[in-house]
Image (cartoon, rainbow, N blue to C red):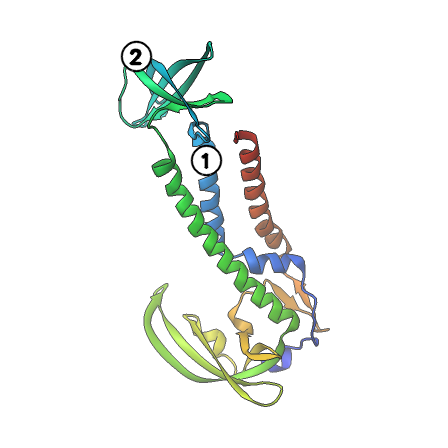
């Protein structure tokens, strides 16, 4: 039995399990890798947040009280300092990658006037290297996640509201690009909309068998804008369809896992911000 006999979908709108939606928006190894990068960026903030100083608006003369190597063996020096403000003694630590000071050296101290314990040695700012680099990777990861979510929303919309049509393969062209030692092909397929007008959809894939195993392949298109379409076999839907034409979740726990990653990451990052930030 071919796909045309097997695949029966209810008329739109169709219901879709929320776990399937989360898998479509957040699933896949690329998205998972992006969330891991976000987590690594978060850990970088956890490690270095005590050294990030915000809102330093005052200055005082201070003194180096101790210089020590970092405990983890990195080429990093902890410079302990002290200074007085309005008759009170304050202490702090600023780290550096070079041994710049010795005990007893006089140094300039930048500090926050209404919170003098928020202080650092003048001229030592971790933003350029220790913070901006992981933030840059984090931004790239967020872009990847946003692209995945947008594509997922398109697929969800098509599964719920799209009209089912059948496309015939017109052309198969090599691109010269290889993925997993398989060449990526440009597949051109043609389908007809509700008014019997022809439309073409182009798919680039290295798994061509999914689009060649039947004389006609299923397509979902937007009735009001038939040019917007997706190949039904192009996406791992994380769901199957019942005899009644409705979708049911195949990997429920996978969808819950995909949803838990951003919740954990964003919650932990939010807690860090509110617990450490001084204005």
Q: Secondary structure at mark 1?
A: helix
Q: Which mark sits nearer the N-terminus, 1 or 2?
A: 1
Q: CA separation, marks 1 and 2?
A: 29 Å
Residue matched to label 2: 103
- Quadrant of image for the N terminus: bottom right
- Residue 80 vertical position relative to residue 76 in the rendered view, above or below: above
Q: For residue 63, which quarter of the picture?
A: top left
- Asked if residue 68 can be seen in this view, the reply is no
- Asked if residue 114 can be seen in this view, the reply is yes
Q: Secondary structure at mark 2?
A: loop
Q: Residue at x 55, y 55 (%)?
A: 26
Going by the image, does 201 lie left or right of 245?
Answer: left
Number of residues whose C-alpha sits closer than 10 Å to that of mark 2, classed few (under 14), some (14–19) or many (20 or more) = some
Which disc is residue 45 wearing?
Answer: 1
Give the mark count.
2
* Tag 1–tag 2 contact (CB < 8 Å): no
- Give coordinates of residue 138: x percent, y percent: 44, 46
Q: Residue at x 47, y 45 (%)?
A: 38
Going by the image, does 75 lie left or right of 4?
Answer: left
């Amino acid at each position: 039995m071919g796909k045309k006999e097997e695949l029966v979908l209810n008329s739109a709108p169709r219901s879709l399990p929320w776990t399937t939606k989360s898998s479509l928006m957040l699933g896949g190894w690329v998205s998972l890798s992006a969330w891991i990068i976000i987590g690594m960026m978060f850990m970088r903030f956890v490690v270095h947040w005590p050294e990030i100083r915000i809102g330093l608006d005052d200055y005082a003369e201070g003194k180096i009280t101790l210089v020590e190597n970092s405990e983890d063996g990195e080429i990093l020096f902890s410079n302990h300092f002290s200074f007085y403000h309005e008759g009170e003694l304050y202490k702090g630590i600023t780290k550096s990658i070079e041994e710049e000071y010795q005990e007893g050296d006089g140094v300039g101290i930048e500090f926050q006037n209404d919170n003098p314990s928020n202080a650092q040695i003048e001229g030592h700012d971790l933003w350029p290297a220790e913070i901006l680099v992981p933030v840059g990777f984090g931004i790239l990861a967020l872009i990847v996640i946003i692209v995945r979510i947008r594509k997922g929303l398109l697929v969800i919309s098509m599964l719920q509201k799209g009209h089912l049509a059948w496309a015939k393969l017109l052309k198969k062209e090599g691109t010269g690009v290889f993925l997993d030692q398989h060449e990526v092909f440009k597949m051109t397929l043609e389908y007809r909309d509700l008014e019997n007008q022809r439309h073409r959809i182009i798919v680039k894939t290295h798994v061509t068998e999914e689009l060649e195993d039947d004389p006609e392949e299923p397509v979902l298109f937007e009735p009001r804008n038939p040019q917007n379409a997706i190949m039904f076999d192009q996406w791992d839907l994380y769901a199957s369809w019942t005899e009644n034409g409705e979708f049911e979740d195949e990997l429920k726990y996978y969808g819950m896992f995909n949803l838990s990653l951003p919740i954990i990451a964003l919650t932990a990052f939010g807690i860090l911000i509110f617990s450490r930030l001084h204005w």
